[in-house]
């Protein structure tokens, strides 16, 4: 056997000992949850998407697991951005990057938050969420290419730390081109593909009812079922975006093989959401071991030796 494979990567100029870390969403809302990520094998700590003010989120039940994944309509429950800004200093104890997810309810809110984060060196990068599907009455910015450009123009007037964006999944090939044309015009450090597939509906046949309370049962779909969509988005943006924009894969990662597929499609790091919710922070060590073993078997010493090298059949 060749020597053990390295899972190390670099995102937004910050070195990560492992390319696996949490998706913004599950178990990253409180300082205790963030500490647990810090103490785990996750390569970075990413906060829950922060709004200007603390929010209770949508009524429960608002997260349900199914055999193939999950449906959620959390509605951005979070402690408000000041809490996650304050946490940045505490995160330094773990010796890994701390990324803050920002999801203002309006462009103005996003600008206010971004301005308030400036000069906090303990925030390694910001992940601007262009894709929360769960706030009633709020369209996702990521599906409006003009609005995405308008917001990014304003954001880059004020942002201090490296900034990436979390995108919704796209399904139509011209939409990839349209979003890539916007993103390539800005000094974006990374793009996270994908957020949940918005507004699915899960039906319980026994009760003849929906399974979550908000929005008459409509919610974001995550887990196994979304992996092909996530891989398609990683692959497309990897081929369309500037080389200096890293792709972070998110969607349907349960095993080392799933993470390998994301990296093969072009991901420089891989986030874990539904499986983290199911398994807890131990998932990072397990999936890391599985990925490292697979790389070793295939003779890949590091991520860069297979990143993006997906073959076509023609
Ligand atoms: C929530 C869901 C998302 O998919 C997201 O990007 C941000 C927040 C939520 O409902 O809390």
Image (cartoon, rainbow, N blue to C red):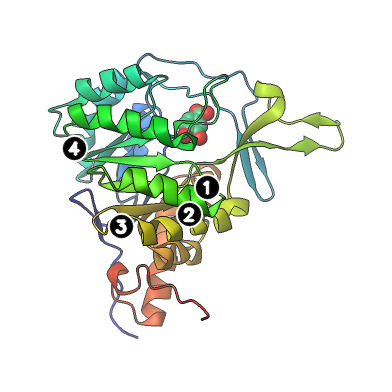
| Residue at 30% from the left image edge and 33% from the top image edge | 152
Image position of 23 (left or right of 133): left
Tell me, yes or no, if residue 282 can be seen here.
no
Q: Are marks 3 and 4 in contact (CB under 8 Å)?
A: no
| Labels 1, 4: front one | 1
Q: Point out the image quarter for the N terminus.
A: bottom left
Q: Earlier in the sequence, mark 3 or mark 2?
A: 3
Q: Which class describes the residues within 10 Å of circle 2: few (<14), some (14-19), or many (20+)? A: many
| Residue topped by disc 4 | 92
Give the number of the mark in front: 3 or 2: 2
- Callout in the foreground (1, 3): 1
Pointer 1 with pointer 2, Cβ within 8 A: yes
Could you give the CA–CA distance between mark 1 and mark 4, rounded to whole angstroms? 35 Å
The mark that comes first in sequence, 4 or 2, is: 4
Counting other residues with Cα less than 10 Å from the Cα at mark 1, is it few (<14), some (14-19), or many (20 or more)?
A: many
Real-space Cα separation, disc 1 to disc 2, in angstroms: 7 Å
Residue 117's place in the image compared with 230, above or below, is above
Residue shown at 50% from the left, 51% from the top: 174
* Residue 293 place in picture, x, y as percent: 41, 73
Image quadrant where residue 288 sits: bottom left
Which badge, 3 or 4, is on the more N-terminal residue?
3
Q: Residues within 10 Å of mark 3 (few under 14, many from 20)?
A: many
Quadrant of the rendered image containing residue 291? bottom left
Above or below for 77 versus 34: above
Check disc 2 and report its element: helix, strand or loop: helix
Residue at the spot x=35%, y=68% of the render? 307
| Residue identifier under label 1 | 170
Q: Tell me what residue is drawn at x 40 percent, y 81 percent.
A: 298
* Residue beneath disc 2: 233
Residue that badge 3 annotates:
18
Front residue of this view, candidates 245 and 182: 182
């Amino acid at each position: 056997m060749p020597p053990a494979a390295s899972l190390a990567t670099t995102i937004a100029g910050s070195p990560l000992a492992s390319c696996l870390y949490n998706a913004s969403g599950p178990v990253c809302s409180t300082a205790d949850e963030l500490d647990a990520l810090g103490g785990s094998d996750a390569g970075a700590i990413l906060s829950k998407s922060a709004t200007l003010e603390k929010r209770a989120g949508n009524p429960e039940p608002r997260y349900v697991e199914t055999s193939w994944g999950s449906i959620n309509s959390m509605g951005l429950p979070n402690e408000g951005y000041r809490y996650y800004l304050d946490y940045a200093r505490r995160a330094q104890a773990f010796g890994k990057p701390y990324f803050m997810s920002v999801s203002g309810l309006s462009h103005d809110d996003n600008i206010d938050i971004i301005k308030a984060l400036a000069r906090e060196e303990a925030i390694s990068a910001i992940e601007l969420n262009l894709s929360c599907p769960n706030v009633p009455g709020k369209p996702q910015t990521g599906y409006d290419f003009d609005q995405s450009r308008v917001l990014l123009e304003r954001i880059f007037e004020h942002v201090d730390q490296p900034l990436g964006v979390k995108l919704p999944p796209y399904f139509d090939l011209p939409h990839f081109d349209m979003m890539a044309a916007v993103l390539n015009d800005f000094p974006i450090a990374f793009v996270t593909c994908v957020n949940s597939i918005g507004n699915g509906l899960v039906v319980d046949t026994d009760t003849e009812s929906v399974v979550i309370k908000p929005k008459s049962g409509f919610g974001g779909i995550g887990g196994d079922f979304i992996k092909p969509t996530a891989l398609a988005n990683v692959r497309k943006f990897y081929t369309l975006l500037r080389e200096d924009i890293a792709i972070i894969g998110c969607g349907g990662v349960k095993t080392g093989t799933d993470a390998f597929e994301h990296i093969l499609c072009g991901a420089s790091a891989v986030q874990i959401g539904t499986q983290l919710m199911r398994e807890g922070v131990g998932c990072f060590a397990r999936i890391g071991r599985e990925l490292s073993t697979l790389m070793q078997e295939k003779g890949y010493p590091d991520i860069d030796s297979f990143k993006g090298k997906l073959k076509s059949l023609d």
